[in-house]
Amino acid sequence: MSQVTKLTTGLTGLVVSKNPHHTLGILYNKIMRTLQNMPEGAAYRKHTESVIKERTAILKSTTDVASIEKKIGCGQIEEVIMQAENELILARKMMAWKPWEPLMKEAPPNQWSWPPVQSRS
């Protein structure tokens, strides 16, 4: 069976990745290393770690790019790479923001309720 080479993604500005399997593996490893520096109970770490572990398992069990795209289900592999790059940027920002730490002062009443509760005067 001959290997079909993708010539274009069909998306403006998004070029075909020459080695997407390798690129994604590196990005997922970097994301996991960043997450390891967060507290185990941090919601962002738990949820992101779950997604990255699932996708890493897909990468390890599948070599065909089309199959990886289908199993991940988030577009073309180049789009998945872009998502992983953005997730790595966000993970590093989360390390600086530390959203798992307690608030500096008490939140105003109903801050966390939606839709906003109207105060009646």
Image (tube, grey):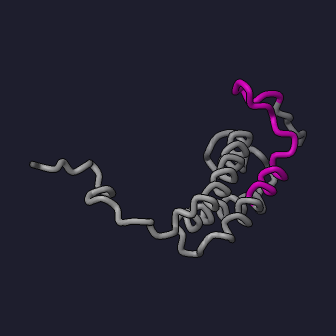
Q: Picture coordinates of residue 26 (x, y %)?
A: 81, 56
Total label count?
Answer: 0
In what quadrant of the picture does the N terminus appear? top right
Give percent across and percent down for residue 106: 35, 66
Residue at 82 percent across and 33 percent down: it is 6
In the displayed structure, would residue 18 be above or below residue 110? above
Is 16 contained in the magenta span?
yes
Q: Magenta includes 93?
A: no
In percent of the image, x 72 and y 50: which residue is there?
A: 68
Residue 57 appearing in the image: no
Task: Locate residue 100 relative to residue 94 in the image: left or right.
Answer: left
Residue 105, relative to residue 75: is it above or below? below
For the view shown, which residue lies furthest in the left direction? Answer: 121
Q: Quadrant of residue 81?
A: top right
> Which residue is painted at 79% across and 31% down in the image?
15
Compared to residue 24, the image places residue 54 above or below, namely below
Q: Which residues are magenta?
A: 7-28
